[in-house]
Image (cartoon, rainbow, N blue to C red):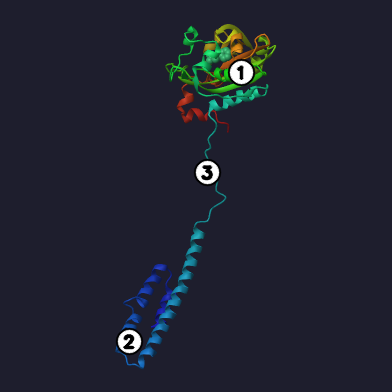
């Protein structure tokens, strides 16, 4: 019996067959169990002899099975490793990576540009008080120019900021005339507008402020000229046109020449050769005064622009809504390889 069992063990090649062998020889219905079960019928003298023999046979078969099992497992593992080896010479599958949003890129580009001219970047709350959003910027309650920026009010005194100018008012107010200010403030702003190709109820602004002794309109023009050339190309010209903002006096709008624009921006541009980029001016004396700056000593310039508009002109984007709907086919075009 032992011999026969050992022979079978040697022949099996799979774990399943081995288990079958184990059951047939050592299982409850197997011959050894049968022998042990029949012990009661044997004489006193035979019992220990047969018992010892049966146990020995069982042990031998068990050992053989265990040993065989280890060997089969080893073989199995080896086979698996052979089958599953990785061909390192195969070309890899490309990993798709994301990239910064076009709007993020343009804001960072503009930030870097002004940082290079010594401006610091400041941020402020999007839920703003009526005071900082309007009052401190020479827009008292009931001022008709408040209608230029139709607002989302939260309470009578709180609203979603309509521009980032309140960040400038806050900064000046914090310093109370104690030092000069040279800052830009990028951020989200909100206006009650019907969304279309050129309007959005929420958009982005970057405004700048420089307050110091003897700041003049020519300083503003110099900074804006550098900005426009660096962003759009050295062959661009700028021009300032008179305009109106309650917080600046005089106020101007800046155009850039558009010799090398592309996309739909061009059709707007071709007739006059100029396209409006931003609003600016010299800080109104009343705004300086309210923030604790003596307008006899200090003067300053301020400007404000919409990065969406800038990106639309620079890259020929025809609809402002592309910035917010996040169609990957649109966004992908502006990812650097
Ligand atoms: N705050 C103005 C706006 O949102 C832009 C601006 C800023 C104009 C600074 C002039 C000077 O319309």
Split into quadrants, the picture shows ligand 1 in the one at top right
Dot 3 falls on a residue whose secondary structure is loop
Dot 2 falls on a residue whose secondary structure is helix
The residue beneath circle 1 is 172
Percent coordinates x, y for residue 107 in the rendering: 57, 24
The front one of 140 and 227 is 140
Residue at the location (57% across, 25% down)? 123
Q: Are marks 3 and 1 in contact (CB under 8 Å)?
A: no
- The single residue placed furthest to the right in the displayed view is 214
Residue at the location (52% across, 43% down)? 93
Using residue 112 as the reference point, say whether residue 316 is left or right of it. Answer: left
Q: Quadrant of the N terminus?
A: bottom left
Of badges 1 and 2, the one in the foreground is: 1
Of badges 3 and 1, the one in the foreground is: 1
Badge count: 3
Of badges 2 and 3, the one in the foreground is: 2
- Lower position in the chain sequence, tag 1 or tag 2: 2
Q: Quadrant of the C terminus?
A: top right
Using residue 138 as the reference point, say whether residue 211 is left or right of it. Answer: right
The residue beneath circle 3 is 93
The residue beneath circle 2 is 39
> In the figure, residue 286 lies in which quadrant?
top right
Please indicate, yes or no, whether residue 16 appears anywhere in the rendered image: yes
- Lower position in the chain sequence, tag 3 or tag 1: 3
């Amino acid at each position: 019996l032992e011999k026969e069992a050992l022979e079978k063990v040697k022949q099996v090649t799979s774990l399943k067959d081995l288990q079958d062998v184990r059951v047939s020889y050592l299982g409850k219905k197997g011959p050894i169990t049968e022998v042990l079960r029949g012990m009661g019928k044997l004489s006193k003298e035979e019992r220990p002899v047969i018992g010892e023999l049966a146990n020995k046979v069982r042990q031998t078969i068990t050992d053989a099975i265990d040993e065989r099992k280890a060997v089969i497992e080893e073989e199995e593992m080896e086979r698996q490793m052979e089958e599953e080896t990785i061909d390192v010479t195969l070309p890899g599958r490309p990993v798709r990576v994301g990239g910064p949003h076009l709007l993020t890129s343009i804001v960072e580009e503009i930030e870097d540009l002004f940082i290079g001219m010594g401006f610091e970047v400041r941020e402020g709350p999007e839920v703003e008080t009526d005071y900082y959003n309007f009052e401190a910027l020479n827009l008292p309650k009931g001022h008709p120019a408040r209608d230029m920026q139709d607002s989302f009010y939260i309470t009578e005194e709180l609203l979603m900021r309509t521009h980032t100018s309140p960040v400038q008012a806050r900064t000046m107010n914090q310093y109370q005339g104690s030092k000069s200010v040279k800052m830009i403030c990028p951020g989200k702003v909100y206006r009650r507008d019907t969304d279309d190709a050129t309007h959005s109820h929420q958009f982005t602004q970057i405004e700048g402020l420089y307050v110091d002794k003897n700041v003049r309109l020519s300083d503003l023009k110099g900074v804006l000229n550098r900005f426009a050339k660096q962003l759009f190309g050295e062959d661009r010209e700028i021009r300032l046109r008179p305009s109106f903002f309650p917080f600046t006096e005089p106020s101007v709008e800046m155009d850039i020449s558009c010799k090398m624009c592309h996309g739909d921006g061009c059709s707007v541009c071709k007739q006059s050769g100029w396209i409006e980029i931003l609003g600016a001016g010299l800080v109104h004396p009343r705004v300086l005064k309210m923030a604790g700056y003596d307008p006899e000593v200090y003067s300053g310039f301020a400007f404000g622009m919409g990065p969406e508009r800038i990106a639309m002109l620079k890259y020929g984007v025809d609809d402002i809504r592309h910035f917010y709907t996040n169609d990957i086919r649109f966004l992908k075009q502006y990812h650097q390889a």
